Amino acid sequence: MTKGRLEAFSDGVIAIIITIMVLDLKIPSGKDLAALNSISMVFICYVLSYLFIGIYWSNHHHLLHAARDINGKILWANLHLLFWLSLIPFVTNWMGKNFLAPWPVAVYGSVLLMSAIAYFILSKALIRHNGKDSLLGLSVGKDIKGIVSIIVYMSAIPFSFIISAVAFALYVIVAIIWIIPDKRIEKNIKPA
């Protein structure tokens, strides 16, 4: 399998994930703006999850663009990542309908944590296969943002049972960290 086919498959799965998330947004009953209050928390959770999916899609694209080729281990690491990402619509909807309830916030954070770990595993598998001195290996480096994200998620999950708003705020902080463009790979890729 070529890396282009892997990227196309991943793009399709991510598009389906986003579609499922938006279909979970139910039309409120009522004809005025006040009717939107009934879905405001679900919408806030949707926006956060949409950002996370977009961040993963963008960075996944950069990873594969910088890689020379892939192998079977990379295929499985990619499927591992897509599995965790595929759970985001479910946990988004559950947390949105039970905004700041401890268990939904904790499970949402657990899915984010496992997605981050899966992405970390995928990037390491790509680097191992393509070489530490490859464009990808040199660009990713120590992946401080990835490690910090994992640590923040691990800290946030217990907060779900103490002050769930703090856990939610930590999830938002990770999104902010990643939404700031990461130029590690982009700066090393020469335009075709």
Image (cartoon, helix red, strand yellow):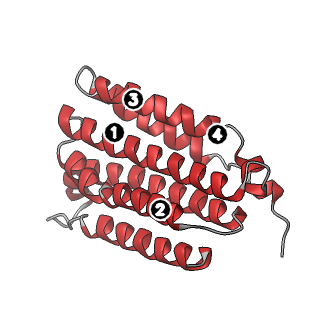
Residue type, numbered disc 4:
Asp
Q: Nearer the viewer, mark 2 or mark 1?
A: 2
Q: Residue at x 45, y 39 (%)?
A: 172
Q: Residue at x 78, y 55 (%)?
A: 134
In primary-sequence order, the first of circles 2 and 4 is 2
* Label 3 sits on residue: 154
Q: Is residue 183 visible?
A: no
Marks 2 and 4, Cα distance to the nearest angstrom?
18 Å
* Label 4 sits on residue: 143
Give SS at disc 3.
Answer: helix
In primary-sequence order, the first of circles 3 and 1 is 1
Tell me if 21 is positioned left or right of 189 in this view.
left
Residue type, numbered disc 3:
Met
Residue 142, above or below 23:
above
Residue 10, above or below 130:
below
* Label 2 sits on residue: 78
Give SS at disc 2.
Answer: helix
Marks 4 and 1, Cα distance to the nearest angstrom?
20 Å
Q: Quadrant of residue 136?
A: bottom right
Q: Position of residue 156 (x, y in %)?
A: 37, 28
Q: Nearer the viewer, mark 3 or mark 1?
A: 3
Residue 109: image tag: 1
Q: Residues within 10 Å of mark 1 (few under 14, many from 20)?
A: many
Q: How many marks?
A: 4
